[in-house]
Image (cartoon, rainbow, N blue to C red):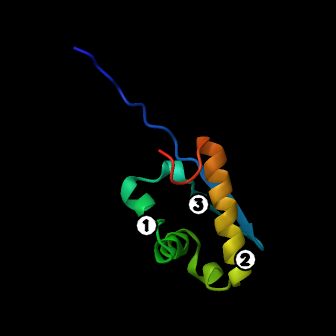
Amino acid sequence: MAVFTLKRKEAKTLRVNIGENSFTIPLMGSLNWKEARLLESVEGTYSFFKKNVPEEIFESLSIDEYNELVNVWRRESEKASGKTQGES
């Protein structure tokens, strides 16, 4: 009988600095399937970042700043996994 033991890995994150504040956001490969599925819509992506960025900071972001944050997160997620979003 074959045996496989899955070794849990530490979550990969993106450290984000906004002003004097610093926090981490988990990268795509560290999300579970339920969390990752949220990112299939604009509303889900918004909810994901709102959950991971302190509310007072998140609410102060301009549209350009929010888009930049999302784009950097996607790029770093792709680098960490070696795949583009949507690939399995």
Residue sitting at x 73%, y 66%: 17
Q: Sequence-wise, which precedes: disc 1 or disc 3?
A: 3
Say if 60 sits above or below 20 in the image.
below
Say if 43 sits above or below 33 in the image.
below
Q: Residues within 10 Å of mark 1 (few under 14, many from 20)?
A: some
| Circle on res. 64 | none
Identity of the residue furthest to the front in this view: 87
Query: Which quarter of the rendered picture does the N terminus lie within?
Result: top left
In the picture provided, is 5 more to the left or to the right than 16? left
Task: Please state which of residues 28 and 23 is positioned toward the viewer in this rendering.
Answer: 28
| Circle on res. 25 | 3
In the picture provided, is 35 more to the left or to the right than 50? left
Residue under label 2: 65
Amino acid, disc 3: Ile
Q: Residues within 10 Å of mark 3 (few under 14, many from 20)?
A: some
Dot 2 falls on a residue whose secondary structure is helix
Amino acid, disc 1: Leu
Q: Residues within 10 Å of mark 2 (few under 14, many from 20)?
A: few
Residue sitting at x 33%, y 23%: 4
Q: Are marks 2 and 3 in contact (CB under 8 Å)?
A: no
The CA span between labels 1 and 3 is: 15 Å
Of badges 1 and 3, the one in the foreground is: 1
Amino acid, disc 2: Glu
Dot 1 falls on a residue whose secondary structure is helix
Identity of the residue furthest to the top in this view: 1
- To which quarter of the image does residue 53 belong? bottom right
Residue sitting at x 42%, y 31%: 7
Residue under label 1: 38
